[in-house]
């Protein structure tokens, strides 16, 4: 039988309560930690998923070298980003020209911050143009160079892709050959400069060979913009948004108002950021010597697109369409990105460069759905009330639901919208407010919402496709943005 000494018994007697208290403390701490962890899980488990359609030209920039850019976005925002496989996009083809879907997952704040950073990358990528020039057939050898060294040098220095038309018929008598240039505006201009320099050197050499320096002819190349199959993303093909949030709403600004039955909106998103950059580029361009020499308006032609100021004290130039000329010689202008009209003297407007025209018009003609004016015509008070309710030209975000299409007097389809203001802490239905204030009554005819693919013709006469509920995008917070 084991005999314990008196000292050992005393030690056990003292250690037992202490051990029990220690075990109890550890158990309570573990239980408390588990409760805290569960609480944290509840707080942070609210995540959203945003799908962003990324043009193929922007995929590499978003990923970055060895994934550096996308990792940096994840690190700064705390959101998770990954590109879906093409089968997840619903596209099983191997067409690399189709947009890719970028999935952003995280808390609403983190996901929205990451989405904004992605859009900023997309808008920072220069627009890709394809232009064509005609050069003398005898100069092709000098442009291509031995083993293609010259044409590779042009591409390397300018950054533009250079393609020379192949002549299959060796008996052709044409004295000119087509050279196609693809790249940004700056890249194409640089390539033109290099090719022009090569042609001038060639002409001087040919002149010396003929011993006739008096016949040296310097080439001044002028490019003509052509359509390119691999720049589908940049073509004007969109007038009404296809990006809807989970409730079927799209975020818009009301940019101009004639009355509730005829107003214009802009879409909130990266195209609005692109438009701001275009305005800055146009404003910078009209101050150049090139614009003053070659882009002044000398003849008023209805339908032409020009650069113009909306007001004299507004230094920014915007894109406008010429509607006609007044009796006192002023030009009637319609601003295609806002829906506003103004008059200006032709000395103060400029023709637009081709790359400024390519971007789609952003002003979308709309009509307020489900209501009609009291007495059959919108009063001045009703128009003023509608402008205030929609924060017209104040660049505050409204939510819009496309109810159906309406056909105007010119046979053009335009969307009928339900407008909701969410900035006051609760939803304010603009149509209901007009009814409540006595400016409108509900239409008697029932309205059927259309979810099928439809066509919309914008102010420029461009036929575009519209697919309601086509994709998802997170709602953008109410902000103010200068034009």
Image (tube, rainbow, N blue to C red):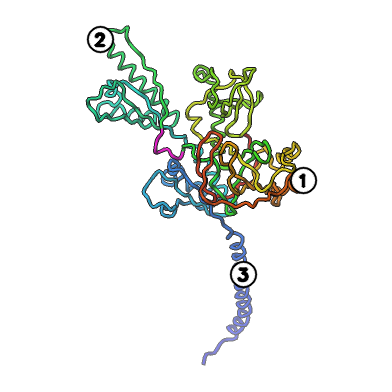
Which range of residues does the magenta coloring cover? 227-233
Q: Residue at x 67, y 36 (%)?
A: 258
Q: Are marks 3 and 2 in contact (CB under 8 Å)?
A: no
Give me the disc on residue 29.
Answer: 3
Q: Secondary structure at mark 2?
A: loop
User: Which quadrant holds the C terminus?
Assistant: top right
| First in residue order: circle 1 vs circle 3 | 3
Give me the disc on residue 210.
Answer: 2
> Residue 68, located in which quarter of the rendered image?
top left
Determine the main secondary structure of the stretch shown in magenta. helix
Vertical position of residue 2 compared to residue 453: above or below? below
Vertical position of residue 40 compared to residue 386: above or below? below
Q: Is residue 471 visible?
A: no
Task: Residue 331: give x, y in percent of width and height.
Answer: 60, 22
Q: Are marks 1 and 3 in contact (CB under 8 Å)?
A: no
Q: Secondary structure at mark 1?
A: loop
Residue receiving disc 1: 438
């Amino acid at each position: 039988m084991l005999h314990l000494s008196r000292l050992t018994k005393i030690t056990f007697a003292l250690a037992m309560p202490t051990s029990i208290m220690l075990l109890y403390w550890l158990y309570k701490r573990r239980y408390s930690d588990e409760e805290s962890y569960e609480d944290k899980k509840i707080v942070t488990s609210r995540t959203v998923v945003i799908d962003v359609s990324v043009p193929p030209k922007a995929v590499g920039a978003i990923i970055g070298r060895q994934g550096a850019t996308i990792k940096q976005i994840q690190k700064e925002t705390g959101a998770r980003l990954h590109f879906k496989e093409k089968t997840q996009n619903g596209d099983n083809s191997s067409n690399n020209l189709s947009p890719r879907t970028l999935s952003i997952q995280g808390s609403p704040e983190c996901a929205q911050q990451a989405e904004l950073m992605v859009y900023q990358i997309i808008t920072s990528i220069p627009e890709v143009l394809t232009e064509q020039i005609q050069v003398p057939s005898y100069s092709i050898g000098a442009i291509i160079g031995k083993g293609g060294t010259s044409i590779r040098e042009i591409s390397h220095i300018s950054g533009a892709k250079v393609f020379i038309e192949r002549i299959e018929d060796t008996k052709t008598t044409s004295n000119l050959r087509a050279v196609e240039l693809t790249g940004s505006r700056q890249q194409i201009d640089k390539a033109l400069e290099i090719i022009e320099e090569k042609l001038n050197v060639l002409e001087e050499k040919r002149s010396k060979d003929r011993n006739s320096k008096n016949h040296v002819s310097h080439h001044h190349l002028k490019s003509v913009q052509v359509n390119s199959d691999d720049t589908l993303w940049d073509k004007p093909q969109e007038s009404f948004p296809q990006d809807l949030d989970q409730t079927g709403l799209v975020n818009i600004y009301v940019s101009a108002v004639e009355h509730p039955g005829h107003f214009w909106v802009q879409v909130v998103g990266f195209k609005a950021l692109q438009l701001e950059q275009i305005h800055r580029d146009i404003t910078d361009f009209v101050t150049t010597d090139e614009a003053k020499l070659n882009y002044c308006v000398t003849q008023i032609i209805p339908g032409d697109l020009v650069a113009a100021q909306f007001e004299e004290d507004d230094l920014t130039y915007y894109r406008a369409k010429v509607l006609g000329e007044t009796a006192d010689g002023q030009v009637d202008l319609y601003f295609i990105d806002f829906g506003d009209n103004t008059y200006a003297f032709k000395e103060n407007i400029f023709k637009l460069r081709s790359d400024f025209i390519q971007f789609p018009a952003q002003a979308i003609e709309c009509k307020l759905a489900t209501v009609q004016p009291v007495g059959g015509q919108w009063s001045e008070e009703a128009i003023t009330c509608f402008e205030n309710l929609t924060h017209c030209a104040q660049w505050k975000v409204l939510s819009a639901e496309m109810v159906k299409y309406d056909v105007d007097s010119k046979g053009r389809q335009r969307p009928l919208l339900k407008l909701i203001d969410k900035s006051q802490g609760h939803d304010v239905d603009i149509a209901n407010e007009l009814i409540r204030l006595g400016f409108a009554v509900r239409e008697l005819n029932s309205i059927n919402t259309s979810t099928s693919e439809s066509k919309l013709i914008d102010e420029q006469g461009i036929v575009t496709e519209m697919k309601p509920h086509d994709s998802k995008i997170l709602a953008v917070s109410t902000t103010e943005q200068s034009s």
